[in-house]
Amino acid sequence: MGTLGAETVNRAATLLLATLAATNSGCGTDSNQTTSSGSSSSSSSSTSSGATTGGMQTPIREVYQRNPWGSPAENLLADGDFELSIDPGTGQYGWIGVDAGGSTQIPLVSETGGICRSGIRCALVPKGQSLLGRGTAAPNMMAHHASIFGKPATPPPAGTEPATVCKSIMQVSMISCDEGLIIRGLKPALAPGDDGYCEFTADVPGSKVSLCMYVTLLEDAILDNATLLPAPAVSTSIEPFELDTAQRDGARAAARYVRTHQRFDGPKVATPPAREDLR
């Protein structure tokens, strides 16, 4: 096979250099190139972050850091974040679900993940159901600050007045655990927060008896992040919130149900029948 002439080699080298120059001319330039007609042609590609042609970033997923126990250590409610009260059956939990008449216990249904406000579980409660959250009182007649968050299970229609959203979710009160006497009603926020949750709050005086939280649902809602915290310097900005007669009657019925169904012994274990030794 013959060797290439000098003219052939020079021509091949020139063609290679021209090709490399054309390829490198696109490096470091904007993806929007002007065409010969003067119009702009744009190219876009989908990325793992969900980038769109408008430059907006649509996340594929969001990652949260959550404490599986939820509530602060000083919370006087037994299970402020519903982490331990969600069970398909009925039993003795921090939160007890009861029907409107307060005579039948109803299992609680949970939501999980990012829809919750704190912790990793929250309660999904239907309209007409009531809840009683068990707690205690701060020592030495110290005052308290009570709070719970709730939001509609279905987002309110567009154009709904923010002032009406929170009022229509639920009624909440702090009661004496044994008698069910209402001590203080919790006032709803004027409007939902950015996460859609409405906070219900109250300043609660010191108590010699245990305190419980009683909730009556006015619509299907998600509840989470309930606290009863000692408050040495109670704010006077939260006025007592009046509740209707139905809330008062329901609180007494729920407390009576819990009191009459409270067990103080362990589960009974059946004793196996005696038998003769096998020989």
Image: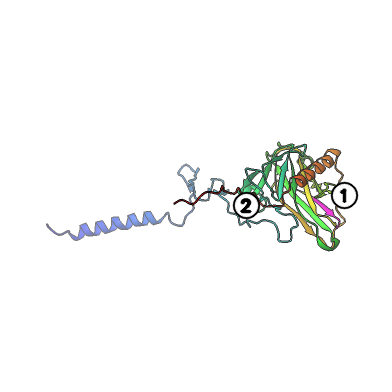
Q: Locate residue 49, reporting x and y percent.
A: 53, 51
Element at badge 2?
loop
Q: Locate residue 272, reporting x and y percent.
A: 57, 48
Q: Is residue 258 magenta?
A: no
Identify the residue under disc 1: 240
Is residue 198 among what the camera can see? Answer: no
Residue located at (77% from left, 47% from top): 259
Foreground residue among 164 and 5: 164
Foreground residue among 42 and 102: 102
Q: Locate residue 161, reporting x and y percent.
A: 77, 39
Corner quadrant of residue 220: top right
81 vs 7, left or right, is right
Residue type at mark 2: give it: Ile
Estimate how packed mark 1 is, as few (under 14), some (14 to 19) or many (20 or more) residues with alpha carbons within 10 Å.
some
The residues colored magenta run: 201-206
Using the image, determine if residue 85 lies above or below residue 101: below
Q: Quadrant of the N terminus?
A: bottom left
Q: Which disc is residue 21 wearing?
A: none
Corner quadrant of residue 159: top right
Identify the residue under disc 2: 120
Residue located at (88% from left, 56% from top): 236
Residue type at mark 1: give it: Pro
